[in-house]
Image (spheres, rainbow, N blue to C red):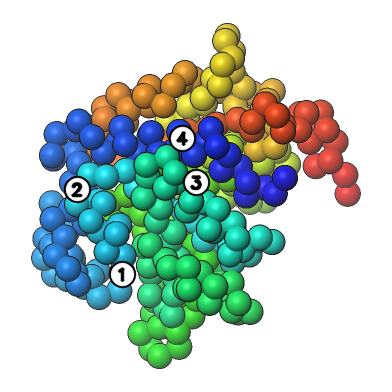
Amino acid sequence: MSCSRRLSMPLGRRLARAAQLNYRGLPTVYRNGPLTNTLRGGFAQSRYMSASATSALGEILKVSEEVLDAVATDKPVVALESTIYTHGAMGKDLAQEHETLVRSHGGVPAIIGIVDGVPRVGVTPEEIVRMIEDKNVSKVSRRDISYLVGMGLAGHKMNGGTTISGTMVLARLAGIRVFGTGGLGGVHRGGENSMDISADLTELGRTRVAVVSSGSKGFLDIPRTLEFLETQGCLISTFADGRTGNVDFPAFWARDSGCKSPSVVNTERRPRPSSSARRSWASRRGCSLRTPSPRSSPSPRRRCKLSSSRP
């Protein structure tokens, strides 16, 4: 099974349901994102940015009509990163599979990426193909967005697949609150000396988006990853998926990691109160919702550990 197939059917239902619960039943002041009350072709002034800032943003961030309408009318929207398509093995077919999966559960998919130097929320199938076929396509984290945009404004138009951190930045600007992905980054082994720590973790500490994933990859230092996320103030919850008692923080391929999850939720409805509470006190932190690999196709933790320790 491809690593990007972590968007399993149970996860698809959870993504769509989480998006529905995040958008409905909240006071208007909490529902409004930077794109709420959007005017076609640009951004209306919002409580997040000044009129001049939203006008300038509208010139460099393009959002599809479908996503604009969905955000403005509180329909569930699920952001999807594009790096797994541009730098993965399955590319176009996987993008279509993910979009179909989100739609089949009532959500609106929003693939995010950089096309011709312009950040786009709601990348079209044709644009995905162009990005995949571009041999010079970049991998775009938060730090790289301004570089590609600046190069585009200077006439050198570049394409880029957004990573988790890059996708979170653009999703937040578009008013999207739920983001589905495969494996989250973390602290690499020996990271206490090398400082090799994924930008995904720092993004969760400063961008209020709910990231649904299959956990951090097993070759990472998961105990230190959890400690780092705690320091960042990121809420971490794992779906119990029918389990009782202590539930492990999932390790991507493996349902168990040997590390207890800081909190556990039993249904898709459970994350909503915490998410609403975080918005009510204007917390800027993101949250990480972990869904374990399907029972039918997990890899035992011992096997993952042995594989990741090989030279």
Q: Given the image, on which type of amino acid does mark 1 rest?
A: Lys
Q: Is the residue under label 4 in contact with that under label 3 (CB below 8 Å)? A: no
Q: Earlier in the sequence, mark 1 or mark 2?
A: 1
Q: Earlier in the sequence, mark 3 or mark 2?
A: 2
Q: Earlier in the sequence, mark 1 or mark 3?
A: 1
In this view, the mark in front (1 or 4): 4
Q: Is residue 160 visible from the viewing direction of this image? A: no
Q: CA distance from mark 1 to mark 3?
A: 24 Å
Q: CA distance from mark 3 to mark 4?
A: 9 Å
Q: Label 1's element?
A: strand
In this view, which residue lies farthest toward the front? Answer: 104
Q: Given the image, on which type of amino acid does mark 3 rest?
A: Leu
Q: Given the image, on which type of amino acid does mark 2 rest?
A: Thr
Residue 60: horizontal and vertical position, in percent? 30, 74
Residue depicted at 54% across the width and 73% down the height: 129
Residue 125: horizontal and vertical position, in percent? 47, 68
Q: Label 2's element?
A: loop
Characterize the local packing of mark 1: few (<14), some (14-19) or many (20 or more) Cα atoms within 10 angstroms.
many
Q: Is residue 281 left or right of residue 103?
A: left
Q: Is residue 27 left or right of residue 308?
A: left
Residue depicted at 64% across the width and 31% down the height: 294
Which of the labelled discs sits on residue 73, or is there none?
Answer: 2
Q: Is the residue under label 2 in contact with that under label 4 (CB below 8 Å)? A: no
Query: According to the image, label 3 marks what residue?
Result: 101
Q: Given the image, on which type of amino acid does mark 4 rest?
A: Arg
Query: According to the image, label 1 marks what residue?
Result: 62
Residue depicted at 26% across the width and 38% down the height: 23
Q: Is residue 86 left or right of residue 24?
A: right
